Structure formats: C-alpha cells, structure tokens
Amino acid sequence: MDIPRLTVLAGPTAVGKGTVVALLRQRHPELVVSISATTRSPRPGEIDGVHYYFVSDSQFDDLISSGNMLEWATVHGRHRYGTPRPPVDEALDAGKSVLLEIDLSGARQVRQSRPDARFVFLAPPSWDCLVDRLVSRGTEDEAERSRRLETARIEMQAESEFDTTVINDDLKTTVSELARVMGLE
Ligand code: 5GP
C-alpha cells in the first residue's frame, strides 16, 4: 500500500510538537508544513505568515463560511485555530508530502474528511515529563498552564484513535522515527 502523503500529527500540549516539526522540516525541506490560522495573538518572535496567520475573529469566521477551512477548533477553551484548505490541496495535487500539526479535535475532523491520511500521535515519555516541559518552557501563566494540562489529560486518552504513536524522548530519534513513518526516509 502507498504511504499517505497527508500526515496529521497531534499530541498533548508541551509534548514538543513544534520542536520536532522544526527539525523534521530542516531535514526534509521538501515537506510542506501547513501554516494554521489562529485568533490568538503572536508570542514574542512569532511572525505572521511563518508561524501562523494571525487573524481576527471575523476573518476566521469568513474562512469557515467560505469553505476554506479543512478543519478548525477552539483549543484550550480559548482561541480558534484552523487549517486553510487551499495550500494543502495544492501541495497534495503537486505530489508533495504535507504535514498538519493540529489538536485532537482537528485530527478527528480530518479523519472524517480525509480517512486516507496518516494519523500520528506524539506522546511524552511520561505524564510527569509533560508537566515538567510545560512548566519549564515558561510561556504560559499559571491559569493557562492548568487549562492546558486539563486538555492534555483528555488528549492523552485518545492515543488509540491514531495509526501510530511516536514517543518523544530523544529528539533526533523521534524525528527519524516520524520521517520513517511518513515515508520520507
Ligand atoms: P499554540 O497556541 O501553543 O501555538 O498552539 C496550541 C495548540 O493549537 C497546539 O496544541 C496545536 O496543536 C493546536 N493547533 C495549531 N494549529 C492548529 C490548527 O490549524 N487546527 C487545530 N485544530 N489545532 C491547531
């Protein structure tokens, strides 16, 4: 069977998805990583059109109503995030491999509309490790951290819905494993 060219990577908050995807991208510049739209504000260092498309609520509404969102979700009970559909379709039509790094609810939506995609769950080595990572990155205040841990607890239970689990213990090994699963190596 052919390896699907559309891969959905999900996993709990602070598991290190961003770091894994950044390294994977360095190793495989041919891979297209979808840039999500979000209604949250940029963090220091984040660039519009590179890390996310930072949009207003009404712009986000327009993307949904025009049918241009492949999936979208309110993440951590606060802001909306979604995958703009046209760039994904264009890349797949051009024969490229595409990666979506999205939350569980988004992954479930893609499962409905693109059952042929590959669904990969990125898991932490342990729950304690996940909590440590969230605290040590220091980008969220206490209230936001507990909100995210609450979501993470639920997300951890969804692992069995995915085709494959990759445990993010050693970064380089994780990236190699993901690349292998995606058929890039
Ligand atoms: P952050 O605010 O830390 O950048 O992202 C928070 C969460 O939003 C992450 O867990 C990430 O997986 C999720 N997320 C980012 N982009 C999308 C998207 O396009 N769709 C969905 N459903 N979730 C997303």
Image: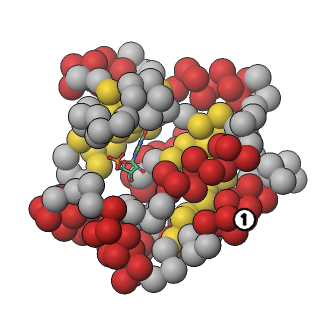
Can I make out residue 69 in this image?
Answer: no
Which x, y percent locates residue 69?
43, 28
10 Å neighbourhood of mark 1: few (<14), some, or many (≥20)?
some
**Side of 16 where 93 appears, left or right:** right
Please, what secondary structure does the residue beneath circle 1 have? helix
Which x, y percent locates residue 102?
46, 48
Which x, y percent locates residue 144?
18, 58
Q: Residue at x 79, y 29 (%)?
A: 95
Q: Residue at x 28, y 69 (%)?
A: 135
**Side of 84 where 131 appears, left or right:** left
What is the quadrant of residue 68 in the picture? top left
The single residue placed furthest to the left in the displayed view is: 143
**Side of 129 where 4 appears, left or right:** right
Q: Amino acid at mark 1?
A: Glu
Q: Which residue is mark 1?
A: 177
- Specify whether tag 1 is near ligand 1 (CB below 8 Å): no
Colour mapping used in the image: secondary structure
Q: Is residue 163 above or below residue 131?
A: above
Query: Is residue 77 or residue 2 the one in the foreground?
Result: 77
Query: Is residue 176 or residue 12 the one in the foreground?
Result: 176
Q: Residue at x 67, y 60 (%)?
A: 175
Callout count: 1
Q: Is residue 184 above or below residue 48?
A: below
What is the quadrant of residue 148 in the picture? bottom left
Q: Residue at x 12, y 62 (%)?
A: 143
Which x, y percent locates residue 14?
39, 63
Q: Is residue 166 above or below residue 27?
A: below
Can I make out residue 185 in this image?
Answer: yes
The single residue placed furthest to the front in the displayed view is: 45
